[in-house]
Image (spheres, rainbow, N blue to C red):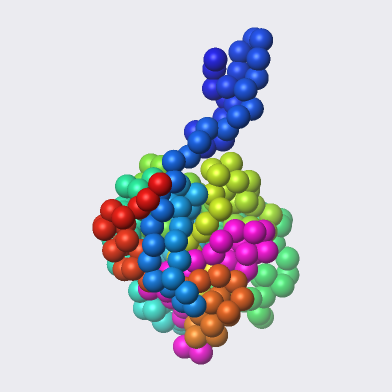
Amino acid sequence: MNVLGSTARNTWRVSAEKVDLVRPDIAPQIVEFPAKPRGISLDLGRTAILVIDMQNDFCHPDGWLASIGVDVTPARAPIAPLVRLLPELREAGVPVLRVNWGNRSDLLNISPALHAVYDPEGRNVGLGSPLPSNGSPVLEAGSWAAATVDELAPCGDDILVDKYRMSGFWDTPLDSILRNLGVTTLLFAGVNVDQCVMCTLQDANFLGYDCILLDDCCATTSPEFCEQATLYNVRQCFGFVASSTALSAALADGKGRG
């Protein structure tokens, strides 16, 4: 029989006489590690990581936020832990999804309210405007401005999803992709933790995903109290907070059980 499907985790087997709808088994790879408010076990075979907005416009000194006077130093903090963690997750077979803000060049799906977030007077560097440093259009899909920072350049199997709001699920194929991959548990990383990361995590929770925020792989350019409130709300209402070092230790221990 022949196989139909875009991912090995969700296929049919077909012939001229028969269609086999039984999905393939995914062997469990269970790891345990400490988290807040309680320790957790998860199946790596049902897990993916969302790396949100680690882009030049948000994290590079020549990007958008820096051009409007924001200190992007805090936004670069997740780079080092993600450089270490992502290869470990890929080695374990965990899909890496890059959820980047990448607008249409004509901005036809962007409302005035979104334009106003960083250009409230309509006369400064806003969505689609050329950056003062290199002329790249702000957060336009395919541009330098919207690209992932060089240190975290995507590998061949990474999955790119463009988003157009603070939530990576709104008006994007993210949910469909994750369900096709058989994913039920999501790890969250990126910036800003109190804005795009939090909005995406909340929507994931509403859609029924298990949500784990990796606190050392997230950051924000907002005041510290914004991050503290986010961490509180995640562990209180929407999921769990853990460190990438704890996850890495669990992966290295090789204590996954079937």
Q: Position of residue 208 (x, y in %)?
A: 64, 59
Q: Residue at x 51, y 89 (%)?
A: 225
Query: Could you tell whether 6 is left or right of 36 in the image?
Result: right
Q: Residue at x 64, y 10 (%)?
A: 16
Magenta stretch: includes residue 201: yes
Magenta residues (range): 198-225
Query: Could you tell whether 169 is left or right of 52 in the image?
Result: right
> Is residue 98 in view?
no
Q: Is residue 67 above or below residue 205?
A: below
Q: Residue at x 50, y 49 (%)?
A: 46
Residue found at the very far top of the displayed protein: 16
Considering depth in this image, is 33 or 190 the residue closer to the camera?
33
Q: Residue at x 32, y 47 (%)?
A: 91
> Is residue 16 in view?
yes
Quarter location, residue 34? bottom left
Q: Position of residue 87 (x, y in %)?
A: 31, 52
